Each structure stands twice: as structure tokens, then as C-alpha cells.
Amino acid sequence: MSSQAKINLLDFDLQGLRGFFESIGEKPFRAVQLMKWIHQQGVAEFDIMSNLSKDLRNRLSELTEIRPPRVVQSQVSRDGTRKWLLSVETPQAPANGIEMVFIPEDHRGTLCISSQVGCSLDCSFCATARQGFNRNLSTGEIIGQVWLARRLLAEAGLDPAAITNIVLMGMGEPLLNFNNVVPALRLMLDDNAYGLSKRRVTLSTAGVVPVIDKLRQESDVSLAISLHAPNDELRDQLVPLNRKFPLAELLDACRRYLEGSQARRRITFEYVMLKGVNDSPEHARQLAKILQGIPSKINLIPFNPFHNAGYVRSADADIERFGEILLQQGYVATIRKTRGEDIDAACGQLVGQVQDRSRRHLKFVEPRPGAHTAF
Ligand code: SAH
């Protein structure tokens, strides 16, 4: 059997591993043991798994492997931010690149991971959009980034436990890859795997409304919404998904997401600051108005430039004034520090050398009749 045809154990959450053991006639309780080896200890070699019998270890190495994405390139920023270009490949699909970023701060370390190769949403200010969409990542390729990042930090002489937070804010729209993302979220939260609290795992979405409701049933991770505009006319241009799920529907889904859960206390709204486009005091007042009654935290993101972007970052003074207006209206508003800019690791700058763009035309969004569009 060629190694590519083996089962990737990183594809399984606890339930999946139990099912796998049952399918090969083994006791399901082995799942917890194996999960601890793989995700807590970061072990890829079956020989080391001393509480599993020799026979079982042999069977596992015949049938399965632990196959994370492959590191193609790594870069370290002056500010300590690390970015890795990773290659993902399957027997059916050619190698493709995705990017992963680690952002160390004083009291936390955030790993930003990707959920798709490329992205289909075509947000007008995002570098990932320019390369189009190629394919969804598997669960193993999503959680494999976390597995791999811990190893890579250890190899660099850093503590793997420095990863205290995980954000699905890299390439792709996680809610358009729901079935593979959810088991990966479960592993992040599972005490026998990464054991992170739900406040430290954040899924960021451009607003796929029906799937926000589905997520609510499955998981209570923190939710971030890429809002970027306080009215439909502007948001239709910046985030074309808005033509399908306009602001009123999106904000209702946010209200529902928070219902009946302590852990989800607040929604983070991300707002990229684009000079002369969405950064006026009037925009700030509109934003304050539409978010009324939703427990929120507003994160202002200075636009990060890329080649031919067609946008310019708002002036610092304008960003501060925008934030001030929100504060005066009683909101928590922060300005996101730009990190890893010298290695193009900042928000919206991730691109991953997509090899096969044949599916670029597969757009998720159909324009709403009469919607205003800039394209
Ligand atoms: N599709 C998801 C996940 C990507 S998250 C989402 O839309 O939320 C990436 C975050 O970076 C989003 O908030 C996105 O809007 C923001 N972003 C994209 N391009 C950017 C840029 N050039 N500068 C600053 N932020 C950007």
C-alpha cells in the first residue's frame, strides 16, 4: 500500500477515532489513548506509544499515518511573528500552498490557521481573494496545522505551549467548509487533545448566515464577523457575500448565536480601515447604531496593502477618531496592531501559490437583483 493511501489519523476527532477502532475490530476506548499521544504529546511514531500493544501498533502503522501539511518555507518577522508556507496534497489533488501564522504577544500566543486553499468570497480588499478558490482543507489538514505548529515551535527552541489561542482567520471561509472545520474545533477544545477554552478559539466568518446557526448547534467557540461596512450598499461592494446575506439577517444571526450561552458572551466585529471608503465619522455613527443591543467588541484593522490592491490604509488619526466615536457610544473598540508586516503575514496578506485554479469560476455568491456593485 502506498503511503499516500493510508488513513490520516489527524482526520478524526474523538468520535471519529472510536469509529475507526471499531471498524478494525478494536476496543473504542483506545481512542482516548491514541488521541493523547497524537495531540497532547505531538507524537507521530507508533513505536513510542507504549500503552498500546505491539500488535496494535503494527496494525496502526500498516493502515494509518499521521500526515500533517508539509513545510515549504518559514519566515520570522522582526517582531517575532512567524509565517509558514505549507503544502497540502492528496492522491487526488495536486500540491497546493496555504499559509499559517504565529503571533507571539506578552501574555498570549495566537496561531492563525487556514480552512481552505484560496477563497471563493472575493472580498475586494483581500489578497487571498485574488487567487480564487481551489478546495476545502480536510479536518486533518486543518488540525494538522496546529499539530505541526507545536512541533515547529519546539524545533525553534520555543515552548509549544506558547500557542494559547487559535483563530480561523487565515485563508478561506471556515463556514463554507463546515463539515471539516467542526471536528477540528472539537479537537482544539477536547481536554484529551489541545484542551483550549472556547474563549480562546475564534472562528472568523464573512457571514454565511445559515451556517452561523448550524455552528451554534455544534460548538460554542467565539465568533468573529468580518463586517467592514455599516450599510448594505457599501458592504455589497466590499464583501460580495452581503448580496446573499444582508446586514439585517447577519446581525439577527449574531443575536441568535449569543442566546443562552455564557461562553459566547460577545461577538467580535472586524472592520478593516480603508481610506476614504469606510472610515468617516458618519460610518462610525452608523456602525454604532446597527450594533445596538448586540454584546460586541469592535476590532479596527488598519488595511494591509498588497500588490495592486487598489485601497490605501486609513490615516492613524482617522482610525483613532473612528474608535473614539465607538467608545463614546459605549462600545469596546480596539485597533489591531499590525504584526509581521515585513514578511507579508498580516491580515489579508496570505496567499499560498494555488496550483490549480480551474475551479475559480465556482462562485458561492449570486448577486441580489438590483444590488449595487463596483465590479
Ligand atoms: N473568511 C473569513 C476568514 C478570513 S479572516 C472572514 O472573512 O472572516 C481574515 C480577516 O482579515 C478578515 O476579517 C478579513 O476581512 C481581514 N482582511 C482581509 N484582507 C485584509 C487586508 N488587506 N487588510 C486587513 N485586513 C484584511
Image: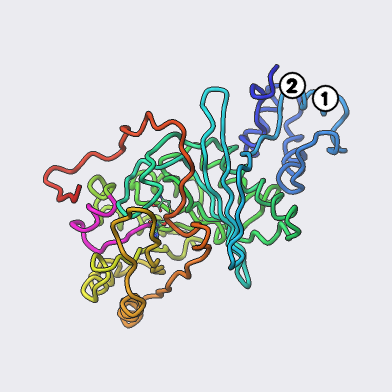
For the record, the magenta segment spans: 226-239
Q: Say above or below: 287 vs 178.
A: below
Nearer to the camera, 72 or 102:
72
Residue occupying image coordinates x 40% and y 55%: 257
Residue occupying image coordinates x 52% and y 43%: 98
Count the numbered circles shown: 2
Q: Which residue is mark 2?
A: 25
Report crowding for label 2: few under 14, some 14 to 19, many 20 or more residues within 10 A (C-alpha): few
Residue 58 has which mark?
Answer: 1
Where residue 42 appears, as percent x and y from the top left, is: 74, 46
Quadrant of ligand 1 in image: bottom left
Residue type beneath disc 1: Asn
Q: Secondary structure at mark 2?
A: loop
Residue occupying image coordinates x 18% and y 43%: 368
Residue occupying image coordinates x 85% and y 38%: 48
Where residue 47 appears, as percent x and y from the top left, is: 85, 34
Where residue 324 appears, as percent x and y from the top left, is: 34, 81
